[in-house]
Image (cartoon, grey):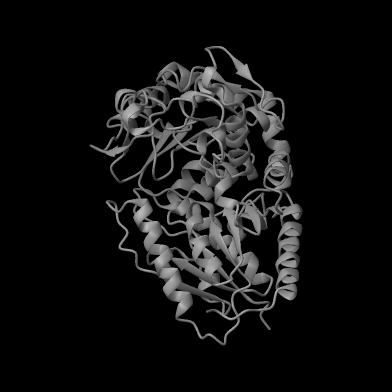
Amino acid sequence: MSSGEILVVPKNGQGHLFPSMELCKHLISRNYTITLIVDSDITSSIPSSLLQSSLFQLTHISTGSGPSQPFHRNHQQMGQGIETLLAGRDPNSNRPVCAIVDHIMSKTQEVFSRFAVPTVVFITSGACWAAVQHAVWVVRPGDMIPEEVRLLPGLPEEMVLKYSDLKQRRHWRPPPAKEAEKDPPPPGGMKPPRGPPLPGEPAPWVEEVECSAAILINTCDGLERPFLDYVAKLTQKPVWGVGPLLPDQYWQSTDSLLRDRGIRPRKESNYTEDEIIEWLDQQQRGSVMYVSFGSEVGPTTEEYPELAGALEESARPFIWVIQRKSAPQHSGQPGSGGMEAKEEYFPRGLDGKVGKRGLIIHGWAPQLLILSHPSTGGFVSHCGWNSTVEAIVRGVPFLAWPIRGDQYYNAMLVVRHLKVGTMVSEEYPDDKVKKNDILHGIEKVLTDGDIRSQSEILRGQFEHGFPASSLASLDAFKDHIDQKSSIIPNKTLA
């Protein structure tokens, strides 16, 4: 007999969908019926183990979303679709025990509350993102000067705020419209806040969780316990680290090579998995630099050639993954975050110059396979959360090159707290990344004894698979919502 139904509302995009689907698997194993509510047909991306489960169903709500659709409009239409879905259910049926909502989709909580469905916010990134963003809001660094460093209250002492950190993080309050016209944010970053918080002004993301019954975060105690504690103390809500939410196969043996085939949807590529394995097998253990910025972001137009030049000049073997879509091009100012699809970048002629030392993948790459291969020794990464935890679990250290959003916070965690990597440049993002920065970073990642030993220590935490602390958190979450369901009468949808 099912423990009850849980509705899950992810944000579209693989960085949100992948962990959401892994969370669904864990909840199904605890005998919950799961209804995944999405705004597009993602059937091809769903693992077969979910599709074949009698406790899983997929509900598609059409929002007319597309590249030109404003996010707030998509969000509104998603809420309307959920309302129609709930209103159309049999009024005599039991209501869901809760809805788990991606924090970016937090506005849908209003709809669930009207139908007496408790909501739980799911943060698909790590706890460091949430904690540091709020701690910076507390110190209000509007009057910081160059070279200044400030402690962030309530966080580990190494998680300090540097003046350069303001360049990429949008810690500012937009001025009134008239003032904004004559005083727009500078290129390359947003202005920091101009003073103390306004009366009643909510801190970043905190407003998104105010109406929730609890918070789930895609992390674990071994990676982010101080940051989980910060979020729990701040929100006064139950907070559970239930990750890292990676495919089952990734946990089955941390010593084996993992093929991506059948785990994640495969797209076009100029290399097969077998060809990549054959190339990796020919390299020395821990010698290969893996370079990938994911599917949505990348360096500036000026920085791509610098990266190509560094890989050519370096003596190290490398795999460089370049997506087949138009490369995200920035305004030329580091940290700007503004992207436009322009002419696709490809390092033409580089393959001929480096010969068999380099493997340039144009399109899809089996990242789980590459990170799990013993020849992989370092990762030039944008520090998206999924990529970050995938590499940490396999003990691969980072050359951190964050581009936008939570990636900067993840880079802070990797470099300053976990100490399993280094930033791509000491001056980043104040200055554009140069070839020599990348060359120095590659050598440091591949040869620094402290970084490599710390990466191995962290890897050792996951030798026995999915973290025990996260299994305990999932059980505690189940106990919590089961208890709430037994106390609160199971109201019908109305």
Relative to 158, is 232 above or below? below
Give the image quarter of residue 350. Answer: top left
Residue 42 visible somewhere in the drawing: yes
Q: Position of residue 62 (x, y in %)?
A: 35, 68
Identified at 43% across, 43% down, the residue is 294
Relative to 488, is 67 above or below? above
In the displayed structure, does residue 221 sit left or right of residue 19?
right
In the displayed structure, does residue 270 sit left or right of residue 28?
left
Identified at 47% across, 42% down, the residue is 279
Nearer-the-camera pick, 301 or 347: 301
Nearer-the-camera pick, 257 or 66: 66
The N terminus - image quarter: bottom right
In the displayed structure, does residue 286 sit left or right of residue 61?
right
Give the image quarter of residue 411. Answer: top right
Q: Position of residue 69 (x, y in %)?
A: 30, 54
Nearer-the-camera pick, 274 or 40: 40
Nearer-the-camera pick, 300 or 101: 101
Residue 378 visible somewhere in the drawing: no
Identified at 28% across, 42% down, the residue is 326
Relative to 368, is 33 above or below? below
Q: Position of residue 59 (x, y in %)?
A: 45, 73
Relative to 346, is 438 above or below? above
Identified at 51% across, 20% down, the residue is 164
Q: Residue furthest left?
A: 343
Q: Position of residue 453 (x, y in %)?
A: 71, 31
